[in-house]
Image: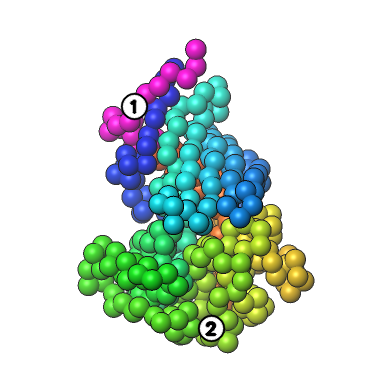
Amino acid sequence: MQTLLLPDRVIRDLISMGEVIDAVENAFREKALGRVQMPAKTYLFYGDFGDLRVMPCYMQTSKISSVKIVNSHPGNREKGFPTVMATIILVDPETGFQKAIMGGTWLTGIRTGAAGAVAAKYLAKKNSRTVAFIGAGAQARMQLMGLMEVMSSLDEVRVFDVRKGAGESFLSFFEEKYPGRCSTVLAGSAREAVKDADIVVTTTPSRKPIIMSDWVSEGTHFNCIGADAPGKEELDPMILKRASKIVVDDVEQAVHGGEINVPIKLGIIRREDIYGELGELAAGLKKGRESDEEITVFTSTGLAVQDAVAADLAYRKALEKGVGSYIDLIG
């Protein structure tokens, strides 16, 4: 009984965004159909430094189970570390044996980008042409990769970031990966980026609104990715008031740590204003976008079930290709 070790650098070459989108969409669907055990995230808060989260999951139909530990330390950029680092343990449900231990940083990034893609598939206008990114870090790149898989109509990519050089680096990444696919705009402000955009993606660690309601046109879809812990928010709550559909990945997590957590605590919106979970749209239990005039919001907190399917995909690919190394943990 040996445990497979897979570092991030190996996993990067094993799985594609398209494969992860399919796996994550199925994971959301399974959750909506009641075939997933997924306790709420457990948090450790390290004051001003950041936090650590523990995320367990068991998918009953496919017999996939995992536990992830992941941090969020916004100040790590200045220290030369990633702001998010993770480790995932893949467990055999029949024996409890830890069949794989793998770097989870790349998996966390790609599965989050995949969730944004699934949300856009159901909630953005089918003919969406312009996408605006507020925040240009590693996760913005993952969101970009996900959208490019599902939104073939896009023809303009805009970006704004308060950090010098971040926006330029993001656009260089885009132009290298998708040469000639879309025109690009380095915006001078969040307002300039958002104006008349069909899709807006937010990936910042902000604890106060950075996008105002009066900047937002009818028909806009928001993928809110940055607000994934208590106290974080990126949107003016009036955008949520205007939205026809507020869709979350998980109601309990979103109420306590997603884009809606602060507005709910302040009584600006209510839990009852949540339209539904993304899995309900994927399973056909609820409708997605119904008109081009709707403002729609997806708030992502990140689910353990996303980690489980991404880790299982990487594990199976590693076995097929004979990569990774092994360690004796038991006995």
- Three-letter code, disc 1: Ser
> Which sits earlier in the primary sequence, circle 2 or circle 1?
2
* Residue at image mark 1: 325
Q: Is residue 82 magenta?
A: no
Quick check: can you spot residue 8?
yes
Q: Closer to the observer: label 2 or label 1?
A: 1
Mark 2–mark 1 distance (CA, rounded to whole Å): 50 Å
Of all residues shown, which one is farthest toward the right? 267
How many marks on residues? 2
* Residue at image mark 2: 216
Question: Bounds of the magenta span?
Answer: 315-331
Residue at x 45%, y 68% (from the top left corner): 135
Q: Is residue 91 above or below residue 205?
A: above
Q: Is residue 218 above or below residue 279?
A: below
Q: Is residue 201 above or below residue 44?
A: below
- Three-letter code, disc 2: Val
Residue 328 pos. (x, y %): 43, 18
Residue 34 pos. (x, y %): 63, 46
